[in-house]
Image (cartoon, rainbow, N blue to C red):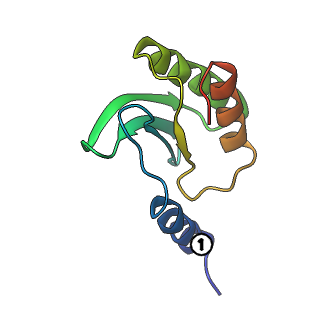
């Protein structure tokens, strides 16, 4: 029987095999640690992080503020379209709230 962590890592590898970010359309990568949420805008062609943001707390309210903040950072750098990399996490709850807030902030994906 596979653990939740191993299932997440399998999903993460499957997603990363397909999702690639460019300078015009970077990858919006999400990571959930034990106590915080992290988001990065990554240009995979150059191998560089364009912008990043972190928030302590793992609830939906924190995810919504993080989504709006990363959308504002992207707008400042004239980025309107991204590729969403959920990092192997299921698309519900906190991850969905973050994605919805980023869309409300003006990002298209």
Label 1: which residue? 7
Q: Quadrant of residue 8?
A: bottom right
Front residue of 91 and 25: 25
- Residue that appears at 49% across and 60% down: 18
Please state if 25 lies on the left or on the right of 43 as rendered. right
Where residue 27 sits: x, y (%)? Answer: 45, 41
Using the image, determine if residue 10 lies above or below residue 97.
Answer: below
Quadrant of the image occupied by residue 63: top right
Residue 72 position, x and y percent, is 52, 15
Locate residue 88 relative to residue 16 in the image: left or right. Answer: right
Question: Where is residue 11 drawn, in percent x and y?
Answer: 57, 67
**Camera-nearest residue between 103 and 66:** 103
Q: Residues within 10 Å of mark 1 (few under 14, many from 20)?
A: few
Q: Quadrant of the C terminus?
A: top right
Q: Residue at x 61, y 55 (%)?
A: 89
> For the N terminus, which image quadrant?
bottom right
The residue at the far top in this view is: 76
Q: Is residue 7 above or below residue 2?
A: above
Q: Is residue 100 left or right of residue 21?
A: right
The spot of residue 26 in percent (x, y) is 43, 37
Which residue sits at x=53%, y=30%?
81
Task: Give the residue drawn at x 66%, y 43%.
Answer: 95
Residue placed most toward the observer, 55 or 46: 46
Q: Seen from this angle, which residue lies furthest front?
A: 24
């Amino acid at each position: 029987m596979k653990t939740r962590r191993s299932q997440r890592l399998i999903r993460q590898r499957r997603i990363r095999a397909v999702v690639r970010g460019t300078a015009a359309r970077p990858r919006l990568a999400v990571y959930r640690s034990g106590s915080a949420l992290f988001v990065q805008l990554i240009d995979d062609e150059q191998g560089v992080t364009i912008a990043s943001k972190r928030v302590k707390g793992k609830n939906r309210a924190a995810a919504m503020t993080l989504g709006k903040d990363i959308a504002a950072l992207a707008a400042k750098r004239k980025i309107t379209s991204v590729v969403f990399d959920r990092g192997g996490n299921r698309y519900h709850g906190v991850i969905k709230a973050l994605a919805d807030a980023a869309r409300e902030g003006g990002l298209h994906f």
